[in-house]
Amino acid sequence: MSQAEIVATGTEPVDERIGGVPARRITLVSGVPGSGRTCFALAFLVAALRRGEPACLVTTDSPEAVLESCRSGLRVDLSPFLRSR
């Protein structure tokens, strides 16, 4: 079996510690409310967009609420992507 390609998560401490996550695989991120799961997901989404890859975030919350919850930690404005769908 070949080793899976690893991609950066966009979260430096995670990438430094484990090198990223396997590409084209499901990765479960768990934690208690307020532990940073949403911010991690958005950082991963931004990392994919910066690599020129298509990306999608599926959420039961409103997209605006998700963006607002992590606005201070994001290094990019996702609003144009949100508007463009």
Image (tube, rainbow, N blue to C red):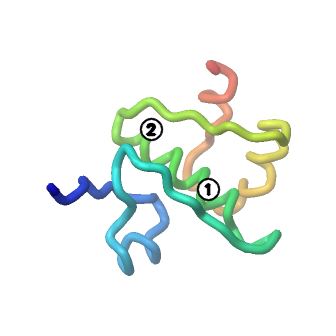
Q: Is residue 6 above or below residue 62?
A: below
Nearest the viewer among 7 and 26 is 26
Residue at far left of view: 2
Q: Residue at x 78, y 74 (%)?
A: 32
* Residue matched to label 2: 49
Residue placed most toward the observer, 23 or 16: 23
Q: Is 6 left or right of 47, judged from the image as shown?
A: left
The residue drawn where x is 60% and y is 64% is 29
Q: Amino acid at mark 1?
A: Leu
Quadrant including the C terminus? top right
The N terminus lies in which quarter of the figure?
bottom left
Residue 22 in the image: state x and y as whole percent: 35, 56
Identity of the residue drawn at 44% across and 38% down = 49
Q: What is the x, y in percent for residue 26? A: 48, 50
The image quadrant of residue 4 is bottom left
**Mark 1 = which residue?**
74
Say few, some or many: other residues with alpha carbon within 10 Å of mark 1 (under 14 / 14 to 19 / 20 or more): some
Q: Tell me the distance, in whole angstroms, between the alpha carbons under discs 2 and 1.
A: 13 Å
In the rendered view, would you say 13 is above or below 62?
below
Of badges 2 and 1, the one in the foreground is 2
- The residue nearer to you, when weighing 43 against 76, is 43
State the image coordinates of residue 79 (x, y, percent, origin top left): 67, 33
Seen from this angle, which residue lies furthest top?
Answer: 84
Tell me the element at label 1: loop
Marks 2/1 in contact by CB < 8 Å: the verdict is: no
- Between 34 and 79, which is closer to the camera in this rendering? 34
Q: Amino acid at mark 2?
A: Leu
Outermost residue on the bottom side: it is: 17
- First in sequence, mark 2 or 1: give its number: 2
Task: Indicate the quadrant where residue 30 lies.
Answer: bottom right
Q: Which mark is residue 34?
A: none
Q: Is residue 32 left or right of residue 40?
A: right
